[in-house]
């Protein structure tokens, strides 16, 4: 590549593309010869070729730039127009003020190969290609040469005014050094192309490693934090303080990594160097955290030492199994009870929790039976592994049950939020009654708000309630009403209201984050890094809101709402990942 990304000019004309022949005589990059025109496709008549030679000689005299034009039937080895043109320029040692226009007459492609240090920008190079392409749309091959030469001269004119003023001084030196310059430019092009290819490969490698590490570390930390809870209950918090500290440090590194990933996914594109640096930072952060965890885990694993207490652990888990036996039935009964009142999509998300819980119980039964057999045969190490896996399954079982049994509280909290928001909106309407409304904006907002309130009340009083969706709709109505009132309120009223909004937004964001986190925990095998990134973004925004609520309340409110919205996006992406995972049958 000669210092810019390939610009493949395929659209020489719609009709030309449609009528292009099915096969063409493909050409490899050729030696250019003594003239500026190389017509291997017989596109030009002898007179046209001579006129093209004269026009390109004139271009060199007028601007100091040189342009070679090559006509072939089709490009091959490489077949990409940009790669073919660059390869031809490099093979012929074209220098910093020398350009090559490659035209495929049957392939209907053209590309202007530009020097790495040339005076023209990407947009100016494209302008030259478009000028030539305009003529080629009518198969005016000679006209394409003239158009390209004229456009190249026009695009370069500002840069070459100074060049021609001092040209007489440097021309002799340039002629002497010409051979060396051409060879040096070709070498420089090769080195730049190789450097870009190497950099792209590094970015791709870091991106792949970072994506895998984000998911692996998030899952590992969730499991480790669960295991830490078991150890604290059995041995006390002081005994596992070092490992708990390492877990907190690893979680901080993971949150920083999620933030970097979020920035890489935003609408502002990063350069390849910036991408390599940022993806490399994610890899470094997570690999360092993982190494530190492994170091601390050695003592933690020794502490757990299930093998030494296998008989007691088996007895405890056997008792726990008996207590958890009704988990699937509790889930089924609770879902049925909730469906008598609610039609929330949240119920659909946990519809298979009873089946999943039954599966965990079957898994626990198998592991406990294997542990008994292994203890009976003296294989205490194998028994310890069975018991460890049974403990993890108990944790997953508890999450599945809690995800359902906690819905009633979630719905009740949502209904409470909805009623509070309705009251807040009604207060807005009362406050707006005496406010000047010259453009009718406030009146329209009041009408829309009343409609939202009516729909919300109808929903919350019915037998198919959707409180989470109602809260979401009321939140949107609240935002719109707030915007309508923002310019009409006195400063003190705005401050008091804002404080209440922050409190409500923080509570809603916390609830949304908790719900999304619950979904990620119960579907960790299916949920990818995008949902986890949004969830990390939501938590970071909520932390920012709490930190700013006194010093910068407007920013705190925006952060809390951003946390709420990011958590909803996380839940939505997690749902999508889970459905895709389920449909794949894996």
Image: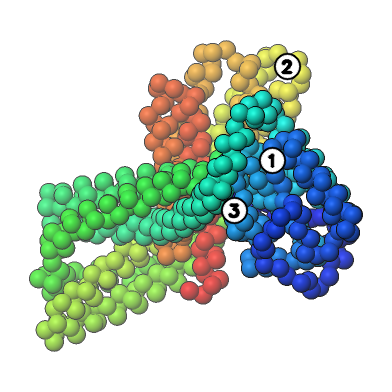
Q: Answer with left or right where residue 41 lies relative to residue 126.
A: right
Q: Would you call the spot at circle 1 few (<14 residues within 10 Å), some (14-19), or many (20 or more)?
A: many
Estimate the x, y position of residue 434 in percent, counting from the top left.
67, 14
Q: Residue 565: which disc?
A: none
Q: Which residue is mark 1?
A: 65
Give yes or no for contact between labels 3 and 1 (Cβ–Cβ under 8 Å): no
Estimate the x, y position of residue 477 in percent, counting from the top left.
63, 34
Q: Answer with left or right where residue 565 lies relative to residue 381.
A: right
Question: Does label 2 or label 3 sit earlier along the sequence?
Answer: 3
Q: CA distance from mark 3 to mark 1?
A: 15 Å
Q: Residue 437: which disc?
A: 2
Question: Does label 3 or label 1 sit earlier along the sequence?
Answer: 1
Q: Is residue 538 visible?
A: yes
Foreground disc of the pair 2, 3: 3
Q: Which residue is mark 3?
A: 93
Nearest to the observer: residue 395 or residue 576: 576
Question: Looking at the rendering, which quadrant does residue 210 occupy?
Answer: bottom left
Question: Looking at the rendering, which quadrant does residue 325 occupy?
Answer: bottom left
What residue sits 64% from the left and 58% below the top? 88
Q: How is the image coloured?
A: rainbow
What residue sits 31% from the left and 63% below the top? 395
Question: Looking at the rendering, which quadrant does residue 16 occupy?
Answer: bottom right
Estimate the x, y position of residue 535 in percent, counting from the top left.
45, 48
Q: Answer with left or right where residue 576 lies relative to residue 71.
A: left
């Amino acid at each position: 590549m000669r210092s810019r990304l390939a610009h493949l000019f395929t659209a020489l004309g719609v009709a030309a593309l449609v009528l292009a022949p099915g096969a063409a005589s493909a050409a490899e990059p050729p030696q250019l010869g003594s003239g500026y025109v190389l017509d291997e496709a017989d596109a030009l008549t002898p007179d046209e070729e001579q006129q093209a030679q004269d026009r390109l000689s004139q271009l060199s005299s007028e601007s100091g730039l040189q342009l070679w034009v090559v006509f072939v039937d089709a490009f091959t080895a490489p077949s990409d127009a940009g790669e073919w043109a660059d390869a031809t320029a490099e093979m012929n040692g074209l220098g910093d003020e020398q350009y090559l226009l490659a035209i495929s007459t049957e392939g209907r492609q053209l590309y202007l190969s530009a020097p790495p240090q040339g005076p023209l920008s990407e947009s100016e190079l494209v302008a030259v290609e478009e000028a030539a392409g305009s003529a080629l749309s009518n198969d005016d091959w000679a006209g394409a040469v003239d158009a390209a030469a004229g456009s190249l001269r026009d695009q370069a004119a500002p840069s070459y005014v100074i060049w021609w003023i001092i040209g007489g001084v440097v021309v002799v030196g340039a002629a002497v050094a010409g051979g060396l310059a051409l060879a040096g430019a070709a070498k420089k092009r090769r080195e730049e192309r190789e450097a870009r290819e190497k950099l792209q490969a590094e970015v791709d490698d870091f991106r792949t490693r970072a994506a895998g590490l984000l998911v692996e570390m998030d899952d590992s930390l969730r499991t480790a934090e669960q295991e830490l809870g078991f150890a604290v209950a059995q041995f006390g918090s002081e005994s596992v303080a070092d490992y708990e500290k390492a877990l907190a440090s690893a979680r901080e590194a993971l949150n920083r990594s999620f933030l970097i990933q979020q920035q890489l996914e935003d609408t502002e594109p990063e350069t390849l160097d910036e991408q390599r640096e940022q993806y490399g930072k994610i890899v470094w952060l997570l690999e360092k955290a993982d190494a530190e965890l492994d170091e601390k885990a050695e003592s933690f694993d020794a502490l757990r030492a299930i093998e030494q207490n296998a008989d007691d652990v088996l007895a405890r888990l056997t008792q726990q199994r008996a207590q958890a036996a009704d988990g699937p039935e509790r889930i089924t009964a609770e879902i049925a009870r909730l469906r008598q009142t609610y039609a929330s999509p949240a119920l659909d998300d946990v519809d298979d929790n009873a089946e999943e819980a039954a599966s965990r119980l079957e898994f626990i039964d198998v592991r406990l039976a294997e542990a008994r057999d292994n203890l009976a045969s003296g294989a205490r190490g194998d028994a310890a592994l069975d018991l460890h896996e049974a403990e993890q399954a108990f944790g997953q079982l508890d999450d599945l049950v809690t995800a359902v049994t906690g819905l009633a509280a979630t719905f009740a909290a949502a209904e409470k939020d909805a009623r509070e928001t309705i009251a807040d909106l009604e207060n807005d309407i009362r406050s707006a009654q005496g406010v000047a409304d010259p453009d009718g904006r406030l009146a329209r907002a009041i009408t829309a708000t009343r409609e939202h309130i009516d729909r919300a009340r109808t929903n919350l009083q019915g037998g198919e309630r959707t409180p989470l969706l109602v809260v979401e709709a009321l939140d949107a109505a609240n935002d719109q009403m707030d915007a309508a009132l923002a310019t009409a309120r006195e400063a003190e009223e705005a401050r008091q209201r804002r404080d209440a909004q922050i409190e409500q937004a923080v509570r809603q964001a916390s609830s949304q984050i908790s719900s999304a986190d619950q979904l990620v925990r119960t579907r960790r095998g299916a949920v990818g890094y995008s949902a986890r990134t949004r969830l990390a973004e939501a938590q970071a925004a909520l932390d920012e809101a709490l930190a700013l609520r006194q010093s910068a309340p407007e920013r705190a409110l925006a952060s809390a709402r951003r946390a709420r919205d990011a958590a909803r996006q996380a839940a939505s992406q997690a749902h999508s990942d889970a459905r895709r995972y389920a449909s794949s049958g894996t």
